[in-house]
Amino acid sequence: MHAVAALAEGEVHEAAALSYPDAMITSLLLLVLFVLFCCVVFWRAARIERVLQRLGDGDPAARTGLAPWAPLGRLAQRVDWAAERLAEERRRLADSEGRLRIALQGCDIGVWDWQLDSGRIYYSPRWKSLLGFAEDETPGHAETWLTRVHPDDLARVTAALDEHLSGHSEIFLCEHRLRHKRGDYLWVQQSGVASRDDGGRVSRMIGALADVSAHKAAQAELLSSREAYRSVVEGVTQVILRSDVAGRLSFLNPAWQELTGHSMDEALGKTLASFVHDDERHSVSAFFAALADGAAGDLSCELRLRCRDDAWRWFALYLRATPAAGAASAAGVLSDIAAQKASEAALLRSNRERDAILTLGPDGFVFADEQGRVSFVNPAFAGMTGLAAGLVVGRPLAELDLHIAQLGGGSPGFAEVGEGADGLLQLERPHKTVIRWLARLIPDGAGGIHGRVIYLRDITRESEVDRMKSDFLSTAAHELRTPMASIFGFSELLLSREFEPAMQRDLLERIHRQTRNLINLVNELLDLSRIEARGGKSFKMQVQEITPVVLNAVAAQYVPAPTHKLEFDWPKDLPKVRIDAEKFQQCLINVLSNAVKYSPGGGVIRVNALRRGEAESACIGVAISDPGIGMTPEQSARIFERFYRADPSGAILGSGLGMSLVKEYMAVFGGDVEVVSAPGQGTTVVLWLPAADALGESGGSGR
């Protein structure tokens, strides 16, 4: 402007020197130039103004487009530069706002802006929608959200807000419940930061609200799950454990102390293997060695753990390798199986007892499964039938029926028998045997049949005894009838007729003799029945010298001098024996009587002592030999049968019970009877008794 004024002044001075017309023209030209200059300046200024207005209206593309000459042009250029920077900042701001908007939408966060001076507050649309409101429903005042805070949380929220506004906290942060439009409460997290002026006064506060209801629900669920887990871990009766790669225990539940007696503090840090019995420790150590090498799998075993009282308790252990924070570890369970082991031991003991009964018992057993196949036979069955277990086990019962039929007993029909069926088998092979059998079905507990068992009892002896009893009763009746018939006949004669004194005496002597025989027979029968009933319990057993008993027996036995002679060869140093003296003397008399009776041709009856064995097996024998008629081996085998006589003619008197009594008495004494005989060469009977020293007795009496 100064340059223009100077130029105009110079031109005026020059014009003064010109003529007037020329001066006028010059002045007009200068005026026109000035006006043109002012118009250009105004136009440029107006353009700059329009650009500034457009920039103010938010048009980022507004530019002056003026050339950068003269001061106004340079100003316009600076305006354009400022517009470009403003547009760039607006673009950045728009990008930032866009990112913020996307971030807020993605984070599901509502924003609020609180002007403390006016009390007005801005709520973002998301803030409102979180609480169920439309954008125009909620008034923009701070009291809006404070009145919606749950009454139980209001004091805590206002305290946190006051703490931040007073400058005691860098950020306002609080979780609380906020009432939704529908009336229920949401868990939200409020956070905000106050803006302060140079004097420290808070004029504005900006913050955010996030719905944390799902997080709170997850927290509650997690807490409930943890509580449930804790109650389960602490309530189970199994030991739950965790250990590191070396086997050192890092976690135990209370069941550990209940079952082992060791406190958890005492056990933690120690290795599991240190509590394991030596016999089972190897498997645990091997597992952790493999775990250290990264090759461990699972371990399942039964082992014993040392308890606090130094007792051993059985557990079932299950261990599995588990990763924990990048390091190998193991977790597992210990189940108490002490009661199970005790039950197994009891069952094993019961099975052994059952097996012993089945193996050692005299009765046979056959077990079959539900398909009717033989699953087990005991040794007694094999002994009865001669059928080995390998021949019948695993085979159908029908095949067993065929095998038994081949033994001469007929088919018992075991394959079809039902509950309670029974019968008799009379086998001819491998030896004559009479067997009584009984079948039972084994229920399976569900209404079905698990199998069946067939019980077999050898009643051969009972059958023989029944036969012998029948024979005995028949023979006894005959033996009793003979003397009684004589007594009855002779007494009837005496009552019905008169006889000479000599004849009368002879008849009375016959009656007396038959009566004595009858009494002896009855006494012998009673003695046998007492032994069978009492087993010798009424005997007066006593350790004593045998010599006096033998001498008394010899003295009591009548030996007819004209035909028989008695030789007695007896040492003095015989050991004592344990006997009932009266019963043993009766044995000697019975044998001596037979020696005399069965030597009708006379001869020497010898009585002498024998010895056999040494120390604990030492025995003393009383041998009585006669030169009589002797016996065949078949007769010798039957000598101890009741009512048996070796003389088939019946000429030799006797009841046939004497040697039976001798056999029974000697069995009670713990001895035996040895008979050596041959037809026409006489008989030697030896009564063997164990020495008292061999019995471990030195004197006194006993039963």
Image (tube, rainbow, N blue to C red):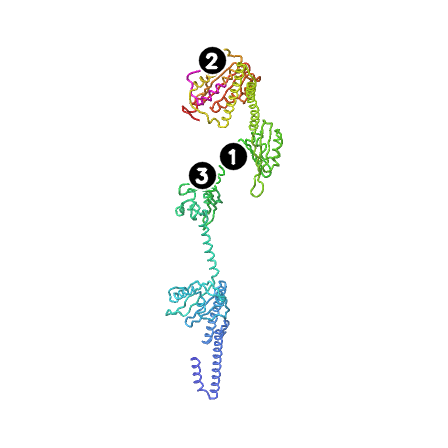
Q: Amino acid at mark 2?
A: Glu
Q: Residue 444, percent across and down?
A: 56, 41
The mark nearer the N terminus, 1 or 3, is 3
Residue 373 x/y as whole percent? 59, 36
Q: Is residue 496 above or below residue 395?
A: above
Callout 3: SS: helix
> Residue drawn at (62%, 28%), measured in percent from left and top?
408
Q: Nearer the viewer, mark 1 or mark 3?
A: 1
Question: What amino acid is at disc 1?
Answer: Asp
Task: Spot the residue most to the left.
Answer: 199
In this rendering, the label closer to the viewer, 3 or 2: 2
Name the residue carrying label 3.
Answer: 279
Quadrant of res 634: top right
- The residue at which mark 1 appears reads as 355
Gap between marks 3 and 2 measured at Cα? 76 Å
At 47% from the left and 81% from the top, the residue drawn is: 38
Residue located beneath label 2 in the image: 567
Q: Is residue 577 magenta?
A: yes
For the residues labelled 2 and 1, the Cα–Cα distance comes to: 58 Å
Q: Which residues are magenta?
A: 567-590
* Mark nearer the N terminus (3 vs 2): 3
Position of 285 relative to 93 (above/below): above
Q: Does any portion of residue 433 appear in the rendered image? A: yes
Give the secondary structure at mark 2. strand
Please identify the residue farthest to the front as the structure is shown. 498
Residue that extends furthest to the top in the rendered view of this protein: 562
Classify mark 3: residues with Cα within 10 Å, few (<14), some (14-19) or many (20+): few
